[in-house]
Image (tube, rainbow, N blue to C red):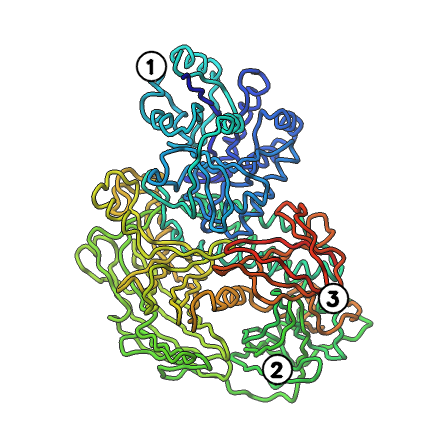
Amino acid sequence: MVKKVFVVPHTHWDREWFFTSDQAKVYLLKDLKDVLDHLEASGQYGSFLLDGQSSLIEDYLNWRPQERNRVEKLVKEKKLILGPWYTQTDQYLASGESIINNLRIGMKQSDELGGHMNIAYVPDSFGQESSMPQIYQQLGIDDAVLYRGFSLDDTKQSEFTWQGEDGSEISVFRMACGYFIGGVVDETKLAQLMTEEPFKTVVDQASTDNVLFPNGSDMAPLRFDLPEFIERLNQANKGKFTFEVASLEDYITAVKEAKPELRLITGEQDCGKDMRVHKSISSSRADLKALNTKLQNYLANVVEPVLALGSYFGLPYPTKTLEDLWKKMAKNAAHDSMGNCVSDRVNADIKARYQKVEDIATALVEVTLRQISTGVKNDGHPITLTVFNTLPVERGGVIGKRIYSPSRNFKIQDYNGQNIPFEITAVKDVTELITSSTIQLDPGQAIYLPEKVYQLDVNLRLANIPAFGYKQLSLVSEQDQEIDLPTRQTGTKIENEFYQISVNVDGSLDILDKLNNHLYQKQAILEENGDDGDSYNYSPAKQDLVSYSTAQPHCSQCIQNALSSKLIIDYDFSVPSDLAARAKGLTDVKMPTQMIVTLDQASKLIKFELNVDNRLPKSHRLCIDFDSEVVTNTSIADIQFGTIKRPLTKKQALRDWHQNQGAWQEKPISINTVQSFVAMSDDERGLALIPQGVREYECIGKDNATIRLTVFRTYGMLGKRDLLYRPGRASGDETVPTPEAELNQHLSFELAMTTMQTGYDQAALASEVKAFETPLQVYQYAEFLNGRLTFPFNPVKRTVDPELSLFKTDDQLVISTVEQTEEGTGYQMRLYNPLFHPVGDKITFNKQPQVVQLVDLLGNKIADLQVDNRTVVLPEINHAKFMTVYFEL
């Protein structure tokens, strides 16, 4: 039977790579103009797929706004195919809210120009994350055209059904040999084209007589003579194949009409056998990975909820500003940009975008908190501290805050006059700085301007901060006096209600879990080794030398406070200067490393800060090891909207690799990524780690019970060939040096550890992690702080109650974010199930809501929810599922 070949003209356009996005935009002007010209001039050309990402047309129209009408006409005629993405995101390192906003912005932007392609097109991202089917479905997308991560060992067919971790299913049409195979064709062999590789594989793997022929490649211009080329193909393949210019939609429709029997594939897809997935790209440029972790968490956990709370008080909701922030994050989330497998110049641009996001986001939070705080009744107290809680559960804890006071002797009280415990850790006289910058907007109106102003770092012990709301405190100044500050002392032990932590003679830690009387021995061991990899892959040195903190000289000190204590351990690390020294067994340079362990009162989290002077070593990796002492078959890690169990090793795949290495694109390593935490547990206890920088782990050692977190790794080239973990050609480009990726500078990273006294499903780990990543926000106001350093505000009437909770849940589901809808009619709250069994929840509002509904990610109503006495009982949802609740107050 004659097979039908759907030739889909496209380009895969990396916004930045070894070239900058500004350079790429210049070439885009030329190439996209050619596309528009040919789509208009040739009725035979059909359509052109603009890589499934609307940011390209945004770039084009920003520089050529006069072309908008022309673009709109071609989009409406389905000749220029846009969306559904804004950028081609990485799926493992981007958060769930980042991915959702990426798709929503891309779909909206495309629709404003005439419509979006309702197909999840992912030609080059490094693996397919298991939350994606659910996200696609909730956006009304049922079909996906994907490439990387799937294994032929699971299915030999290009078409199959993919089921995500939560059970959602979509139809997948896999590009068997990639998006680039039709970009360059030997025209002397047109009659053999479809019977020789790579197209022979494409034909053999097709489940029907319909074959996909992607005509394009990286940053490739369109083929001017495509209609004539199609005619030559048809002439050369008469009776065997017919070729036509088509869209992905045409191809998918034809396959579906043939009704093939499709195999079911489940879970995350990150296999590097048939194509590279660059499993350890998650630790490239650790400094920038840490910024991504920090900012995507801040946007969803703090910024959006704070702005929603401000909207409740009548403040304008900055929809366009938030969209701009998510766009900047999406540009950095594009798979090469997020992977940081780009040139040093491009990584500088990525860092600059992160810095812009941080500037705008922190200013949005500051101005919103200030406007709410200054409207709260203060009972005549001139200095207030308003504590904001953006989670839907009442909570407290020890938090650090920098405040300003007229005296070093003061009290902090709530509005009922109850004292709030605190301790001062640092003090500085800043009278001249503050009083000289204070602005008296009305010279006829007296303001509170003290004779002295001190800057103080304090630890506050807060309690009963209302769910999704605030509580106001007051600073009551008393007669000034000298104070004693905590000092470092020689010591090896700190403790609180839950843990006792001591430093061993080899510099490792023993951690006693008091709740179940279990001693975790020799924890937090630093491990340094060589990295012969590149910006895509970690690969161990061919002649390696591994150094451990337990073999390094060290000294320890402690700071004992009532609310927060610290262990400070300094390691005098000696390591090889480079791969050549490592091969010779030389430890010829120093890498001074400091570990600060913090234990707060009544906290089940142990916080770690690692400060590394990495100015001298090159091409190496630093990890930190924690022995869970749990014998199990799987690790537990969180994904975008839930958790996943992963086998500790890939035994069968490793056997296959060792027996037939030539059949693999890269070694099947068990280095994996997390969204927030990784844990190992049995039915009685467990240990969990919460990385705040690189979010990459591997289970190693006896019984694979030790969790190894990557702290950072360094390398000097964009791409290299013949790595131990990735044999053969270089990924990317092997002519582009990346000296900045050696990270020869002072580095600082944070993480936390906690233990469980039950199995994972009985613990509240996910909620504890969410609270850790969503710190309470404290805003201090005093008239003397209203000045040029913080932008002066006019005074407002104080009419708002000193305490408020907008709503609360029973903390069974984990909240992802709260946002106002784009239309401004109400709010959306997204919650997900972090456990491995069905879970429900309920929401209690501070007043009777007008409307409560379940909606999809586009805001379309799924069901009305019944409200009984301001309370809504949410339906149970299965493991790794999320729900979006729309409400109006």
Q: Quadrant of the N terminus?
A: top left
Q: Residue 777 in the image: state x and y as whole percent.
A: 60, 68
Choose between 488 and 134: the one closer to the eye.
134
Q: Secondary structure at mark 3?
A: loop
Which residue is tagged 1? 188
Mark 2, Cα crowd under 10 Å, few <14 / some 14-19 / many 20+, is some
Choose between 435 and 104: the one closer to the eye.
104
Q: Secondary structure at mark 2?
A: loop
Mark 3 and mark 1 residues within 8 Å of each other at the beta carbon = no
Residue type at mark 1: give it. Thr
| 3 or 1: tag closer to the N-terminus | 1
Residue type at mark 3: give it. Asn
Q: Secondary structure at mark 1?
A: helix
Residue 482: name its quadrant. bottom right
Mark 2 and mark 1 residues within 8 Å of each other at the beta carbon = no
Mark 3, Cα crowd under 10 Å, few <14 / some 14-19 / many 20+, is few
| 2 or 3: tag closer to the N-terminus | 2
Q: Residue 80 in the image: state x and y as whole percent.
A: 57, 27
Q: Is residue 869 above or below residue 743?
A: below
Which residue is tagged 3? 869
Query: Is 233 displayed left or right of 662 in the figure?
Result: right
